[in-house]
Structures are given as C-alpha cells and as structure tokens.
Amino acid sequence: MTAFPIFPQPESCEKARVGQIALVGAGPGARDLLTLRAVNRLQEADIVFYDRLVDPDVLDLVRAGAETVFVGKHVGAHSWPQDRINRAIVAEALKGRRVVRLKSGDPGIFGRATEELDAARAAGIPIELVPGVTAASAAGASLGKSLTERGVANTLVLATGTGCADDPFPDSTRLSGPGTTTAFYMSVRQADRLSKDLMESGLPPESPVEICVDVSKRNERHLSASVRSLPEIIRSNRVKGCAILLVTWPEGVSASPQHVNAADGIKNEPSHVVEIA
C-alpha cells in the first residue's frame, strides 16, 4: 500500500526524538468509509488513542504490535477528561512515537480537535488533521437522498443540540429557515427543546424529520417523525446516543402565526445530562 508521509523524514537520530501526532477521522462507523490516508496512519502508528464511538472493526486496521488505548467518555463517567487526553498524546509524541488520535466522524466537526491541536503545537510537536466522513453525509447517503436540492434546500447547516459547560443548551436552530437542511448532532436528549424551537421559528408541525441511528454500523436504523412528534418517536423507540436528526425546511415555507402558535403548550424539558461524543 502506498504510504503518504506525514512529515519529511528526519535526517538524523537526533532530529527523530520528537514524534508526531495525527488526528484521524474514523468516519461514522463502517471501516470501509475511512479514507486511504486514515488507513495509512493507523498502519504507521506506534500508539492509537481511540474514542467510545469508534467501531471495533476500525481498530482491526491498526498495525499489528501497535498499542491501543481507550479514551472514550461516557455520560456520567468521564474517566478521560480532555486535558488528560491532551497530556497523554503529547507525552507519547515526546518519546518519539507516531501517535494517532482516532476520533469518530470528522475530527474538525464537533470533535474538540482545537484543544489537541493547540496542545501539540505548544509542545512543538508536528501534528496533522486527517478528515473523515461526517455522520450527516453518511446519513444522507444511507437514506439515498441529497442533503441539498435546488429549489428546496440550498444551505446545509451542521448544528449540535448539546454545548459545553458554559453553554449546555445552545441556540441550535438559529440558522434553520426556508431553504435549509439542518443536521443536528448530539441532539437526542434535546428533542423536546428542538421541536419547540423549530415550530416557534415557523416550521410547520407536520414537516418530516429523519432520525438516523448508528449510521453505517451493523445495528443501523432509520425512523421517520414529524417535527411535532419527534420527542415522542425518540422516546417510544428508545433512541439514545449516536443519532443524527435531519430536518429539511423547503424554500417558500415561511413563518406564519398558525405555525408559531402550534408550538404553544409543548413542554420544554431540556436534559441536564451533557452527552459527549
């Protein structure tokens, strides 16, 4: 297999003491959705730090003899906070090792890549970002539909229903409007709030929502709901964790008083459990 060197090869052993870090996108689940560059990095790595949502099949691509370390975060059990991960990958690279930080989806989309990039650069360690197929793209492909369509949706919005500690409930729908498709990441626990916000913005209550669970994995499933029924469909089907919500707001469908009033009486019950991918 042709290798793509991350950095110029060192000219001497002295220069080889500092290793390198690659933040690699594992894609949504299926290992054949990884990029060729991602596979090469896994086969070059001395140590791989991987997330909870990385499919076990992807780990089979890691070079034999390489060390693998689970650094996933579970709701209510954050045994690997971000600053600890930063310290770990930097420490291994300072030993001269080739480090891969393997993240589900694309590292640059809700993947907290900035903290790891900053930590590596502050330590003088060469680092690269290897993009991956993000869940919204995989969900559209799995449904057999485009996320954009002329005359329907000419804008694609990637949003998250769950924020950081300083802003746990972000205004996730502020960019949604006529002519947009919005892909909501980490939003299952916020379905009540998002449903209410979308209807208050003027999206008709019966507008369709696609719920794509565990996209590209063996247990993948799709559910359809309306904006109004979204919270109940999620609860009745026990959807948790890894799901993408796709909402298309067609061109020409604008806010009207009856649409805004349709959201009246819907109870807003945001979850106070932060869901971290």
Image (cartoon, rainbow, N blue to C red):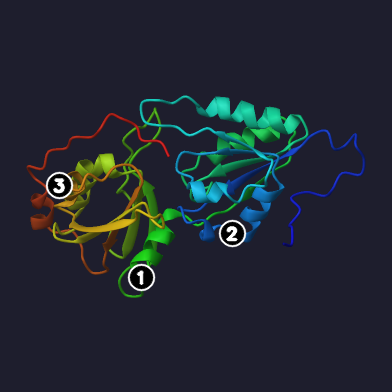
Whether the residues at callouts 2 and 3 have beta carbons within 8 Å, the answer is no
Could you tell which of marks 2 and 3 lies nearer the N-terminus? 2
**In the figure, 186 relative to 134: above or below?**
above
| Marker disc for residue 144 | 1
Q: Amino acid at mark 3?
A: Glu
Quadrant for residue 168, please give it: top left
**In the figure, 155 relative to 195: above or below?**
below
Please give the residue where the numbered disc 3 appears in the rendered image. 232
For the N terminus, the image quarter is bottom right
Quadrant for residue 161, please give it: top left
Q: Amino acid at mark 2?
A: Thr
Whether the residues at callouts 1 and 3 have beta carbons within 8 Å, the answer is no
**Please, what secondary structure does the residue beneath circle 3 have?**
helix
Q: Residue at x 34, y 55 (%)?
A: 220
Q: Is residue 179 left or right of residue 111?
A: left
Q: Is residue 271 visible?
A: yes
Q: Position of residue 114 (x, y in %)?
A: 57, 39
Q: Is residue 210 visible?
A: no
